[in-house]
Amino acid sequence: MVGMRWLLAILLGTATLAAATVADLTREIRETALDPDECYRVRDLTLGRDDLRFYFTDGYLIFTKPVAGRRLGAVFTTDVEGGDGEILLLPPTRGERRSMAAYIGSPNLSERIRTAFLLFTDDTYQALLADMRDKPFNRKVPEMGLLAAGEWGSVMRNLAASYETRLALDLLSRTPPSGGFFGAAINGRKLGNFDALDDPRSREQVLLGQVAVRNNSTYFDIWTSFEARSRRNKQAETAAEFTLRDYRIQATVEPDLNLKVTTRVKVTPRGEARYALPFEIARPMRVGSVMVDGRPAEVLQHDSMRANLVRGTGNDLFLVAPAEPLEPGREYEFEFHHEGRVIHDAGNQVFYVGARSNWYPNRHMQFATYDLTFRHPGNFDIVLPGELVGQKTEGEWRVTRRRTTRPIRFAGFNLGHYDTAKISRAGYTVEVYANQTFEEALQARPREALVVISPPVVWNPRQRRPSDLVLVPTPPPPGPRVRLHELASEVGSALEFMTARFGPPALETLAVSPVPGAFGQGFPGLLYLSTLTYLQPLDKAVTSMNARQQVFFTEILQAHETAHQWWGNVVSAAGYHDDWLMEALANYSALLYLEKRKGRRTVDMVMEEYRTNLLEKLESGGTVDSAGPVALGGRLESSQAPQAWRSIIYGKGSWIIHMLHRSMGDARFLEMLAELRRRHEWKSISTEEFRDLATRYMPPKWPDTGLAAFFDQWVYGTGIPALKLSYAVKGKGAAMRVEGTITQDEVDKDFSAAVPVEIQFARGKPLTHIVMTGPDPAPFSVRVPQAPSKVLLDPQRSVLRR
């Protein structure tokens, strides 16, 4: 510990041991105080942080006292006569300007400031001092500093505590001021409270947004988020701080369901010497201690709801500060000891894991191999991904070990009292687990029913005749195990169907386990399926659903999650802007399988439901589709339209893949999916990489060169057009032509879509002509060999339209 104290004293530039440990440093951050001696009356100050511009026109500026020798914050207030300040931001892309306009009514930010609370590890302090020195009006006013410290001190401390992990990371990492963090909590005159961040460690450095509450749920609405100007100009690159490989996890599920875990993983720093590394873990899990190559390291795990909401991962960020700096390129063994309550009881002895993907330390969900050993009470069963290495009983305990043969991005598990079924398909194993009972929410209440009782064969008329109808309690519905083998067959069939088209799945064994709720998740080698999929088709909970809901829980959900063995687990998304692609490909793969089983009419019904959902009206008056493009990913889950993201990501995403499918044709489309898997196996793919690949499989002379218009309108934009066809047949014999126009409405003027017109004849095959729509009626002229019997606009419903 002495070595760590001296190391931190040196790297923080202090001559004493005042900030000698991580605990000391974070305590100083939490106790951040405003410095009355550093209060200034200021005018005409300008502060630029990448794309953010602040104008402190007239007011007071007070800095915080030093923490580890550096000033980390300031407050600017316009609480003076004629006081004024402004923050400006001009998003660089049309999509981000549209996003901004959806929240604040303007594509650009120009907001008058009441108060601005600043946090920084960059050179903001030096920049503001330099600007003040150049303007003689600016002067110290310590007497106002005392008042300001009393009024704003507690707010500043709360804000610093909210970001203490992020601030500490820069201080511990010796981050130079040129690459430090900047954040501002603004109280604006029109927009109220909102946040502006410029974080070089983020993939998108500039972010603007606001905490909002709707229906007792808290959201962080991201108004805009994008790469900073320096990154757009390729002056710098954002790279992962380290790589991870070879996870070895030993976990114990205690009788009270507390989970105690030792996680070992190989860590290789990148780029430069690392004095501290950031990891993420589920909030219920607390990291007790960490060893790096057998030596104790210090741990900081104190994340706030505010920082968690802004980051949007649902995880706590925590730091590990080793005894010595970590050399880039050298591999280290990290050993984490952590525990918490991530296993929950849904009633009736039905259990589930809440933190399914983040119950152990991870960072950016990198591909790695896993060796998992679980020790648990003998009356429980454990579900793990990978191949079974060993299983044994130790008194009242059972120990199960599984190992993955290929790299995966994360490892889940499940726990319960299960019945099991196992089948083999296409050389792969499917293991299905079913709860022995349904959870309380699905457990039918016993009810009385009228039952006919036959009279005795010999009846004495002097005796009272027995009642023909009596009330008896009905038995509860059959348990989940009734669907066990049927569900195994369904998942196995889907696995076989997709393996034949996409190649090998993520792992050789696919486990299927139940989870309460109306959702599913497809983890590598492990599916979580809603307990609704274990119900019998005639159960009341199923028969009360509409037709599409029944199809979803009985046909689509298990196939969708099976498809994630490829889309999300063999091939992953490059970033949140590309997450839609994994969900859309998985869902459309499930629809391909549904078409094989149930026919095209069933798929058409599902696609029509997606279209209807996208055209539903929001409270704002716009359609669900207008909430934002699929490329916004998780940002669509906002306070404005909390459920819009589901309809857009899954519904519109499926329509986007469907339109590509119809344009390419079956053979080209399936060839593209197979090539997608081969080219990006165990790697990520961006939306632009997908566009480039799709372009190669479009028919020759396709009018939308490079699919530029298609992706601009459907992926990066919003809008569902209303289309109208008008035509006439002209000429005779060899000169006969069909001439017409397609008119579009209900979309922006720059909207353009490739729309098929099908010309049918009494004899022979129909002709299909593609028309690119635009702001004006789009004309077309097609030579025909005979008079057409029909001319139809998109009869196969291959374009999403009103």
Image: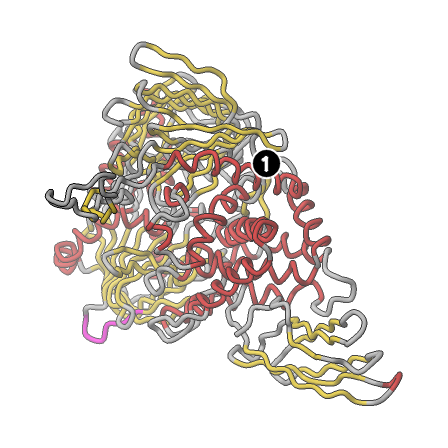
Could you tell whether 388 is left or right of 536 in the image? right
Residue in view at x 21 percent, y 42 percent: 473
Quarter-of-image position of residue 699: bottom right
Residue in view at x 85 percent, y 88 percent: 732
Residue in view at x 41 percent, y 20 percent: 373
- SS category of the residue bearing label 1: loop
Does the stretch in magenta take in 307?
no
Does the stretch in magenta take in 84?
yes
State the image coordinates of residue 203 (x, y, percent, origin top left).
48, 49
Q: Is residue 191 above or below residue 657?
A: below
How many numbered circles are shown? Answer: 1
State the image coordinates of residue 375 (x, y, percent, origin top left).
35, 19
Instruction: Give the labeled residue for mark 1.
Output: 505
Nearer to us in this view, 388 or 4: 388
Residue bounds of the magenta highlight = 80-85
Residue in view at x 12 percent, y 58 percent: 147
Disc 1 marks a residue whose amino acid type is: Pro
Q: Is residue 401 above or below residue 797?
A: above
Q: Is residue 150 above or below residue 290?
A: below
